[in-house]
Image (spheres, grey):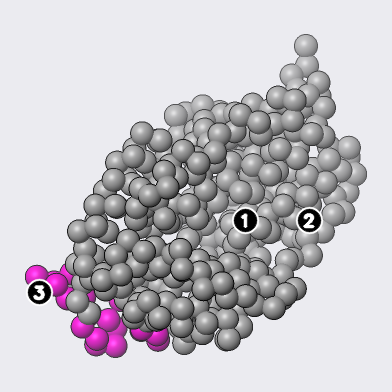
Amino acid sequence: MVERPNVVVVGGGGAGAQVARALSAVLNPEEYNLLLVTVRPYYTHLPAWIRMSVTDEGGLEDRAHITYNYLFHNGNGQFIIGKVASIHSEEGDKDGYLVLENGDRVDYSVLVLTPGSIWEGPLDIPDVKKETVEHLRAWRKKFTESDDIVLVGGGATAAELAGEIKDLSPTKRVTIVHNQDLLLNDAYPKYFREDVARGLEKREVEVILNDSIVDMDISDAGIVKTVNGRRLIADLVILCRGPKPNTSFVTLVPGTLSETNHIRVSATMQVFNYPRIFAGGDVIEWDEQKQVTKYKAHASVIVENIISLLKKRQPAALYPGSYELISISNGKVGVDTFSPACVQTDLG
């Protein structure tokens, strides 16, 4: 009996789950095995974690962990719960295999890399569900017991976290230290970035721009120093510097990863020099903000091109990129939304 080749997806987050689900609808289970390798047996809703890490209000724990019970169409797919340690593949149109941290080997005919990002602070979520309970309990205790909280980095995570802290207690002093002229980054227009800052400042969040903190250690006097010499009172310092691509296991030829350790792909979402390996989601080197709203488009291109590849046709679907849009909550007070397709809204 001829063994069916494996189509393997690594990562069950916002990109990987969509790729796996779409593949399960079009792959013939009599011809191919569809495997999803993921470190957790559930999808983690990261925006909910920002609030959950501050308060238990709303009981979001169960809703933020979304099971994969109905991910595959007609059950056409299998899960492998584990973490990839390395990829083994020769350049060119070749099959390869993965080695997991437990030593297991997973062969593939086609591989999709969607392992997501590595986060800091409250969003550095343990892989084991039981450990997430202690993780949340520890962070909630920190927020409850701290009066002077400094957030290092001024992206969307810091902005939303500041709002949640002010919801917990308006008297807590929150400071955001950001190394740019405005909050967020220049993917968004000046007026929107200024509006996000104004919403936070209305809640007495201090926003310090064009500055940063290198030494995160709080002195015995309860002080942290900025690069520009400011002395900030702090009893809790939280890193909110943005995610990093989870690509340490991508052991392919030099040049596969960019200087920022993102995976270099063509517009077909194929990894350079590896036509049987695709990548999508947070980990690709692409000039766009890393957001789950874009990953349906990633998945569409990847799946169409995988089917072409399996039918021995040249992959022709191209990813054109996506326009930027974002919604940033200010706790329960309001939401700032930017989209080029509509007028900016401020629901605060």
Q: Quadrant of the N terminus?
A: top right
x, y percent for residue 124: 39, 51
Main secondary structure along the magenta-highlighted residues = loop
The residue pinned by badge 1 equals 292
Are circles 1 and 2 on residues that touch, CB within 8 Å?
Answer: no
Identify residue type, mark 3: Ala
- Residue located at (53% from left, 60% from top): 261
Q: Is 274 colored magenta in this rendering?
A: no
Magenta highlight range: 208-231
**Distance between mark 1 and mark 2 Cα atoms:** 19 Å
Furthest-top residue in view?
1
x, y percent for residue 181: 47, 87
Residue 221 numbered tag: 3
**Distance between mark 1 and mark 3 Cα atoms:** 42 Å
**Distance between mark 3 and mark 2 Cα atoms:** 55 Å
Q: Is 212 colored magenta in this rendering?
A: yes
